[in-house]
Image (cartoon, rainbow, N blue to C red):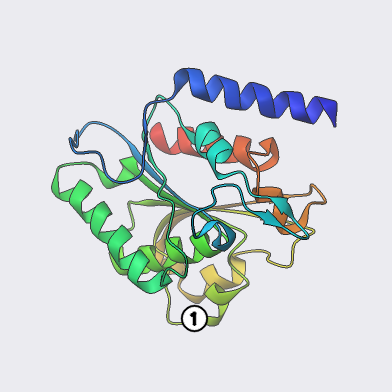
Amino acid sequence: MKNLSFIIFLFTFSSLINAQAIFEKLPKVIKANEHYVFYSHGLIVEGDNPKPVHGRFGEYDFPAIKNALADEKYNLIAHHRPLKTDPFKYASALSKQVTTLLNNGVAPKNITLIGFSRGGFITALASNLLANKALNFVIMAACTSRLAKNKELVIHGNLLSIYETTDGVGSCNDVISRNPEAISSYKEVAITTGKEHGAFYTPNPAWLIPLKTWLKKQDNE
């Protein structure tokens, strides 16, 4: 446990040193040559508390996740959603922000949407609305919940799926198999921490390292 805590500290500390600013919404000045990453948190964080505690999964440390995700290679947009946010309306607003980036000359390959749980569902909804096969999407622990039941929903673009094997929410394979022609590339990572859904409540290297590795790979293609 001490080794894991030290790894998390190092990862978070190095991110803080190298990070660009973390934005709540699109920066006022959009630079066409820069990269933009959106992170959408889980349902439990909706409201006023950035560090809510779940009775089974523990504390969701939204600030620590933002700090760990931040990187000098891109601008991170991580909005704290209000309580009882409508995921469909929010996904529409999110897709409009992406469209604003595209209209300002940002290449779709330089735009990534990341979402965990309810945020993953929102990310998939935005992907369906945008229908752009050059955009990048990361869905964590969301594919076998509400997303699987919305069979008319199509994920497009380059997709990374990460799920925890001890969680009730698993692989994205069935969702992808509904419309494989919409996917430009697909990678899935299964992690096993024993923390169930709570594996994504903190900046755990088990999911953070493969995510950042994938982001760098997309950056070089």
136 to 153, vertically: above or below: above
Of the residues shown, which amino acid type is indicated by label 1? Asn
Q: Is residue 128 left or right of residue 160?
A: left
Provide the secondary structure element on which disc 1 rests. loop
Quadrant where the image shows the N terminus: top right
Q: Which residue appears at 43% of the width and 24% of the height? A: 19
**Is 175 placed left or right of 27 in the picture?**
right
The single residue placed furthest to the front in the displayed view is 48
- Looking at the image, residue 198 sits to the left or right of residue 147; the answer is right
Question: Which residue is label 1 attached to?
Answer: 150
Q: Position of residue 43 (x, y in %)?
A: 55, 63
Asked whether residue 221 is in view, the answer is no
Q: Residue furthest left?
A: 104
Q: Residue furthest top?
A: 17
Tell me which residue sits at (56%, 58%) in the image: 42
Q: Is residue 155 above or below residue 190?
A: below
Q: Residue 133: x, y in percent?
A: 34, 57
Corner quadrant of residue 129: bottom left
Q: Nearer the viewer, residue 179 or 170?
A: 170
Q: Quadrant of the C terminus?
A: top left
Between 63 and 104, the one nearer to me in the picture: 63
Task: Tell me what residue is drawn at x 60 percent, y 72 percent.
Answer: 174
Q: Residues within 10 Å of mark 1 (few under 14, many from 20)?
A: few
